[in-house]
Amino acid sequence: MAAVMSTDPPTAARPGAAQTPTGSIRTPRQRLGSVIMPALRPWRLMLALKVAIAATAAWFLGSLLPGELGEFSYYAPLGALVSLTPTLMDSVRSSIQTLVGLGLGIGLAWALIVSPAPGWVSVALSVGLGTLLAGLPGLGQGRDYVPIAALFVIIIGGANANDFSAGYLVQMALGVLVGLLVNLLIMPPLFVRESAAGIAAARARMVDALRSMANTMRAEETPSPDDPPAWDAALSTIRHDIDAARRLVRDAAESRRANPRTRWNKHDFRGDEGALAALERIAPAVVDIGDALRAALWGIPVPVRLGPEVRSTLAEALDAAADLVDAAIDDERLPEALRTADQALVALRSAVRSAHVDAVNRAAAQTDSGEEPTADPADDPGGENLLFSLRRIYAEVESSKRTDRSE
């Protein structure tokens, strides 16, 4: 039962609790929708329908079993409920684990029944030892059923523990089998769309952050540390978005295993994996750029001098980097984005070097005139670290492009 209620693989990348992916504040209606809509996703509605069908069919078939076994048909729907999870392989895995857990629990109960322990001691031992056995590795979903099965056999089975044990195990196994068949035959889900959406959400977060940085560099007024720009909040959630996208990609890969729908589904799953891998390598560079701009704007954590001659070219390079990240590794826009980014990096490199030469000349002139230099040219006068991070983004995207084409 916990498998259906708690398993929730396809979760979209969630931004901050009260923000949209662009960093704007969400309305109460949007927040309410974010709470309700996960329960109404198409795959979950289909799962609910399949659970209802499987439980009903298992109950009907369980009542047809001969003799004492048919009297425990109410356990068959429970078996169907346990076996139905969003993906086929999860269903198989949880079903096997549940049956193993039931077997261990029933075996423990019989060991206590044949022991000379009084009833109240057997009850205590069933849940105590069952909980210990539930800690065995590999039980997974079935660990919850070890103490439950032991307790049921002792308390509910009682003097009829033999028939109850057989009926309980057989009906649960029947329900599990029905659930697996229903999950296989009725539209087993493929979470490739959710995977692509998670990657797109992580990419959009980075693109928005880079564009916001570019706009900040173009702005005439420097934002106050008490009112930081939008990209500052976006950077704090980039890692969360990447982690959420990675989970979605894993769920999509799991949903493809033993799924007959993969035969006619032509989604480029390997492309999704390549795009996510590229974003995972790019994310640290985007965060580094944000840290360097914070230092340039407010001197936090260390002061960085960024002259106006560098800011304009830096803004262009940031916009080019945003276009580069926005283009997937197999997007038709990628070649043009790579050319534009390369030109922007050349211009930024020239501006950074010019700023450094000017700083050296200015310090030398001040020294020759007997003045104390106002700044050390060895400091970062033009944002070499920014240039390095932007070149890193370019290199990662360009490398991903080559890898994708070679495959």
Image: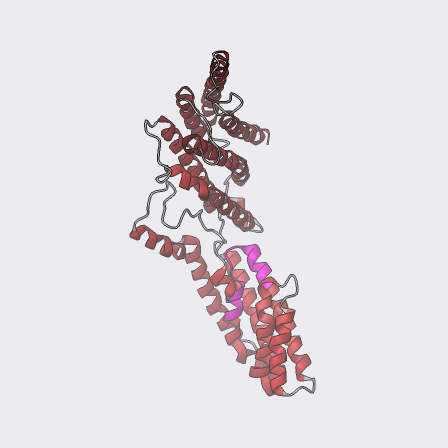
Query: Magenta span covers which residues?
Result: 78-96
Q: Is residue 253 magenta?
A: no
Position of the C terminus, as image quadrant, is: top right
Residue shown at the point (44%, 36%) measured from the top left: 206
> Is 216 placed above or below 353 here?
below
Which residue is at the front of the view, 319 or 300?
A: 300
Q: Main secondary structure of the magenta part?
A: helix
Residue shown at the point (58%, 30%) measured from the top left: 403
Return the x and y of residue 177 as percentages of the image width and height: 56, 65
Return the x and y of residue 169 as percentages of the image width and height: 60, 73
Which residue is at the front of the view, 58 or 222?
A: 222
Return the x and y of residue 339 as percentages of the image width and height: 47, 21
Residue 220 visible at all: yes
Q: Is residue 25 left or right of residue 287?
A: left
Residue shown at the point (51%, 20%) measured from the top left: 377
Q: Is residue 91 magenta?
A: yes
Colour convention of the picture: secondary structure
Q: Is residue 215 left or right of residue 74?
A: left
Return the x and y of residue 237 as percentages of the image width and height: 45, 44
> Is 300 placed above or below 333 here?
below
